[in-house]
Amino acid sequence: MQKITEKTTLKKILDKTGAEEILAKHGVPCVSCPMAQFEMEKLKIGQVCEMYKLSLKNILKDLNKTK
């Protein structure tokens, strides 16, 4: 898988093993939000971090460590 950036969609991120746990650890609410399920293909991790004031840098660092 390519390196995850702020423009990577949640759908692509969630295809990665262990990504859901990393997002949950960082408090990304979209993982458990029923409405987000309809937008996974459009929502980008950068947008989510901006909306919820999450550390994009730390999330990307952890996501890009996994295989």
Image: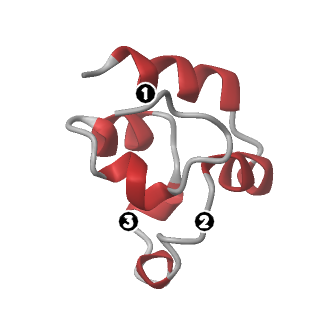
Residue nearer the viewer, 6 or 20: 6
Name the residue beneath numbered marker 2. 43
Q: Which residue is mark 1?
A: 63
Describe the element under mark 3 as helix, strand or loop: loop
Q: Report crowding for label 3: few under 14, some 14 to 19, many 20 or more residues within 10 A (C-alpha).
A: few
Q: CA distance from mark 3 to mark 1?
A: 18 Å
Where is the C terminus found, in terms of image quarters?
top left
- 3D distance between C-alphas at marks 2 and 3: 14 Å
Asked whether 60 or 35 is in front, the reply is 60
Q: Residue at x 44, y 21 (%)?
A: 64
Q: Please rate how many residues cluster around mark 2, counting C-alpha atoms within 10 Å: few if below 14, some from 14 to 19, many from 20.
A: some
Q: Position of residue 40 (x, y in %)?
A: 47, 70
67 to 39, vertically: above or below: above
Q: Give the percent coordinates (x, y) of residue 38.
A: 46, 85
Regarding mark 2 in the picture, which secondary structure is present there?
Answer: loop
**Residue 51 higher or lower than 46, as above or below:** below
Residue 65, given in percent of the width and then of the height, sits at 38, 14
- Circle 1 residues within 10 Å: few <14, some 14–19, many ≥20: many
For marks 3 and 1, the one nearer the N-term is: 3
Amino acid type, residue under disc 2 in the picture: Leu
Q: Earlier in the sequence, mark 1 or mark 2?
A: 2
N-terminal of the two: label 2 or label 3? Answer: 3
